[in-house]
Image (cartoon, rainbow, N blue to C red):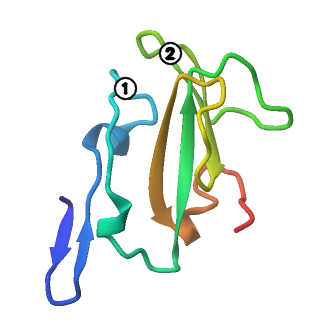
Amino acid sequence: VLYMDQSRQIMKIAREDLMEATCPHDLVNTTLDYSLFDYASTYMNLTFLYGCPVTFPGINPISSCEITGYDGGVYVFPGVLSLGNCKVSVIVPVAADFQSGFGESFNI
């Protein structure tokens, strides 16, 4: 928990390993029950895909990861995407004004 304001019903939480880098040492599944939270319209989900066996036409990876068993690029997409042929996905809610944070602009 990064921040909590009970009077305004605001809580900021984050996985510490993902705050420091897009390539954590070990990838572990984390499930957050989104039905427990009410996101403001100023938030959107980003999907990070790891260990993809193919590249995505016209899309460059944001970084390269050497995570045990998941070497390859890290791709980020707006919204919630399925794994497809990728090994791992991480879905993160972020402020919509963060959309240019990776040097890419997403259409929301």
Q: Which mark is residue 48?
A: none
Give the x, y percent position of residue 27.
37, 26
- Could you say which quadrant of the image residue 74 lies in? top right
Question: Could you tell me which residue is drawn at 45 percent across and 52 percent down?
Answer: 92
- Could you say which quadrant of the image residue 3 lies in? bottom left
Q: Which mark is residue 27?
A: 1
Question: Could you tell me which residue is drawn at 29 percent across and 52 percent down?
Answer: 14
Q: Secondary structure at mark 2?
A: loop
Q: CA distance from mark 1 to mark 2?
A: 9 Å
Nearest the eye: 19 or 8? 8
Q: Secondary structure at mark 1?
A: loop
Residue found at the very far top of the displayed protein: 69
Label 1 close to label 2 by CB (< 8 Å): yes
Residue with the mark numbered 2 = 70
Question: Could you tell me which residue is drawn at 57 percent across and 20 percent down?
Answer: 51
Nearest the eye: 74 or 87? 87
Give the x, y percent position of residue 106.
71, 60
Is 86 located above or below residue 20 in the figure?
above
Q: Residues within 10 Å of mark 2 (few under 14, many from 20)?
A: some
Nearest the eye: 66 or 38? 38
Q: Residues within 10 Å of mark 1 (few under 14, many from 20)?
A: some
Question: Could you tell me which residue is drawn at 41 percent across and 11 percent down?
Answer: 68
**Does 24 sit left or right of 7 as displayed?**
right
- Could you say which quadrant of the image residue 6 lies in? bottom left
The amino acid marked with disc number 2 is Tyr
